[in-house]
Amino acid sequence: MTNRREAAAGAGPGGLDSSTLGTRIRQLRLERGLTQRQVAEPAYTASYVSTVEAGRTRPSGAALRHIAERLGLTHEELLTGRPAGFATDLRSRLTDAQRTLATEGAAQAVGMYQELLHETTRYGLDTERATALMGLGQCELDSGDLTEARLRFEAAEQILANGPLPRRALARRGRAVAHYLAGELGYAVHLLESALEELTVSGLHDPGALLLLYTATIAPYMDMGAHVRAAHVAELALALAPQVSDPALVAGLHRSVARTLVAEGRTAEADASLAKAAELYTQLQIRTELAHCHWMRGYLHAQNGDLEDAERELRTARETLTADRAALYTTQVEVELADVLRRRDKTREAEELLTRLLGEIHLDRGTLHAGGAHRLLGLIACERGDTDAAEQHYITALSLLEPSGATGDLADICRLLGDLLRDTGQVEQALDVYRTGLGHQGGPGTTTLGPAPAEPAALNRVGTAFTLSGET
């Protein structure tokens, strides 16, 4: 009842070796209280099943289907050890976890992703495992655990290393954001630009992946003072937007582009861009990203001198981010809020807020924000005439920000410290600080960045010029 092909040893169907498959069949048979004869009959013999269980025989597809049926399993269940339809169910649960993260926050989603990671690892579902890792990475970004987030995204990218680059774009973007939030702006840009270059060279024109990567470069470009490059990338991203069907990606584009518009003084266009993003995030019920829109609108109002509206928007953003336990983003908003409070003569509240923040910030995950807090405390100390305290805060801010490459912030603090030293009679020291500030301000971004990201070939072929407002 056997044949020669069934008697040959080696790797079994589905990539399992004969020994592993045989052990699985034996365990399943014993769990069900069946004998080898009961599993074998009527098509095979007990001795054949014995050789299969011992790993000395490689069963054919027909033999496997027979054994699976006798064990009360499907062919897939026997080969993989997974229940029938498990992979489909797991993908649905991944979608549920993603929705929970968007609508309820990281604290509610993290347990779901941890369970999914355990199951995908157990059953060898690599693509789904990478998705679970990226979900956990996003949870950890939101909660401020940047080191763990970076490790999650790195692991996901390694799992997907043999697949097409567009599938790795989300993991690469996550790694870059983790480094950016840790104050490692140059390395974040390197990660994103190298991925964009690889996409361009390979000819893999994936609008979604390109848009994701272009959008992620805008914030570090802006912080490094490379405003022209940020505006150029924003134009490339806007040109891609009509080809992208994911509304969350398009919303992220509009939110990021608003920052370049603010820098150019195009406040009405920036407000319109933020309104588009907020509308999409509201429809999608993505709470944390909607909070980012309130945050950005608060910044926009502050730039225009509308401090009451700025305070209202920033408090709204803080309320949502605090509820979602997005600790790092809450800190960023609170530094911005403290600046508005100071400008509204609510100095005591601003100082108390900043002092509390500095006691809570981990320097490995909030260097930029700690630097910003010290800058504001320096301004407050200067305004009340405590020049010694102001000088110390400015020096601390400089030491925190110098490794980051945030040229605009560094130049600003050098100016503040230089003015303070000049006004207190320390002219030579002031000149040294001014020179340092000019070094940070000169040729912003040009000495630390490589060639600008190339325009995708598909956009070159279209030959359509886009402005930052999205008009042709």
Image (tube, helix red, strand yellow):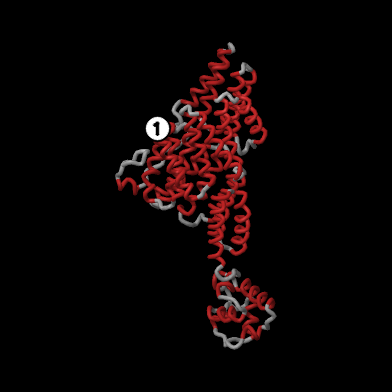
Quarter of the image holding residue 422? Answer: top right
Residue 418: % across, % down: 55, 18
Looking at the image, residue 65 lies above or below residue 429: below
Instruction: Using the image, determine if residue 371 lies above or below residue 281.
Output: above
Amino acid, disc 1: Arg
Where in the figure is residue 374, as x and y percent of width and height? 61, 27
Nearer-the-camera pick, 412 or 59: 412
- Quarter in which the C terminus is drawn: top left
User: Is residue 211 visible from the viewing direction of this image?
Assistant: yes
Q: Is residue 202 visible?
A: no
Observer-nearest residue: 76 or 311? 311
Height in image: 409 above or below 34? above
The residue tagged 1 is: 266
Left or right: 188 in relation to 202: right
The percent coordinates of residue 104 (x first, y second) are: 58, 50
Circle 1 packing at 10 Å, graded few (<14), some (14-19), many (20+), is some
Residue shown at 65% from the left, 32% from the top: 358
Q: Nearer the viewer, residue 92 or 301?
A: 301
Q: Could you say which is closer to the camera, residue 18 or residue 241? A: 241
Label 1: which secondary element: loop
How many numbered circles are shown? 1
